[in-house]
Amino acid sequence: MDDLIQDEKTDFENILSLLIKAFRDYKDRTLEKYKQITPDFNAFSTVDLLELQLSRLIGELLNPHGAHGQDSLFLDLFIKQFLQDKNIPGESSQASLELEHSLPDNSGRIDIFIDFDKSFRLAIENKPFAPDQPSQIERYYEYMDKNYGSENFLILYFSPDGSPPSNFSMPKQDKHKLDKQLKSISYVKLANWCGQCAAEAKKKKATRLSILIEEFSEYMNRTFLGRNTLKNKMLGEQLEEQLEKYVLEAYELNLLWQENQKQYETRWQNKINELINEKLPELVFKNLQTEGIIDDNWEWLRGDFDINKKSIRGFKLKKKNWKNFKLGLMSDRFKRREGKRSFFLALLSKINIERENYAADYYKSTGCNPEKDPTLKNPSTIWYGYFPDKDFQIWGYEQWKGIKEGGDTVSRVTDLFKKLIGACEADIDREEEKRQNP
């Protein structure tokens, strides 16, 4: 029996060795192809698009009178993909589009507002990065219902993973009002719609426009899905050549994976949670001490992040004498997709900092993009900011493997904590002193 087990182990090691060789060969052969296709370059990624710019780009495509010159082509594709179940009256070619449509009494602005020949209205709220504002969707609903009637409007909510508005934006007890008047759309589907727009523009021989829309679609795939479709296609073609040589070995390894899939997945999940909750804070804390940013009066608190849950809990750093404030690395509430999550730095407290413009100063010091409302209720947060590097806002394999001594993830998290500590430490010390020695 022992000899049989040893023989099976040797066979597996041989298969694995062959596959490792195949992947190394494939990596070498893709270098030249990489230089030709440049799959990591994207024009839109270089300009650091914010919510308003994304709304303008999407709005320009939806506008039948837009500079693209394709009339209602893209709007019709949008209706066909997302609103096929809705009987939208009026001619799409006669629709008018407005960005930042103002509500009465300065009670808000609708990102994209489309009027279908005075017979039907679409209100689009675009939430690619920022959290919901208090009662935001509720205010939009009341405005639309009052002015146009419940059968004559629809609110579309764009979010990274298609999640609906939070209870913060539309109270849970009132969500029944929006059963027929609200539809959530993910950026995955928006990227697919853009791909269709590019294909139709190409058919119309609008080559330059087609290329620009494809680039925009690729930007959305990378930013919100962590998916580089150009690279995936290129690598897939190269990998196919290698698998042709090693197809039997790959099949054997696939069978082994299927037989033990649940066990492997559980071990992977536990490993990710351990890296975020224990390994990352330990290494970041060590780096901050080595650089002289913190001393022995500081401590780190283990996180309770779980890759399987839509939880925003993460690890924290604080001075031992701080009773009311902590600095934390939190995860957003979106699951994104399997194995992908986003993280942000947060100042956790139920007590505000009294110094004027402190939030703006922290954004300036850290380089994080300012949020309209940098607060959360659960956990209580008085400031938070996502990583300023777009390619680091959604974490996946590259970030997980960077949680090691000298790893890129550890370096980036350390750098952001370093900047935030430099900006807020004196403010927090002052607030703590007020409360501990009134």
Image (tube, rainbow, N blue to C red):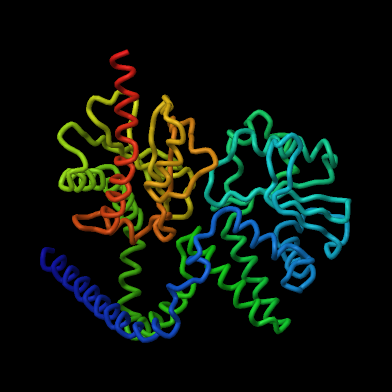
Of 325 and 251, nearer the camera is 325
Q: Position of residue 142 (x, y in %)?
A: 76, 35
Quarter holding residue 408? bottom left
Identity of the residue drawn at 20% across and 74% down: 11
Q: Position of residue 36 (x, y in %)?
A: 43, 85
Q: Position of residue 378 (x, y in %)?
A: 46, 31
Q: Is residue 337 left or right of residue 429?
A: right
Q: Is residue 62 above or below residue 302?
A: below
Identity of the residue drawn at 11% across and 63% down: 2
Q: Is residue 192 above or below residue 386?
A: below
Q: Is residue 234 left or right of residue 181?
A: left
Identity of the residue drawn at 24% across and 31% down: 319
Q: Is residue 148 left or right of residue 172?
A: right
In the picture as drawn, the residue positioned furthest to the top comes out as 438
Q: Is residue 122 above or below residue 401?
A: above
Q: Position of residue 76 (x, y in %)?
A: 77, 65
Residue 438 seen from this side: yes
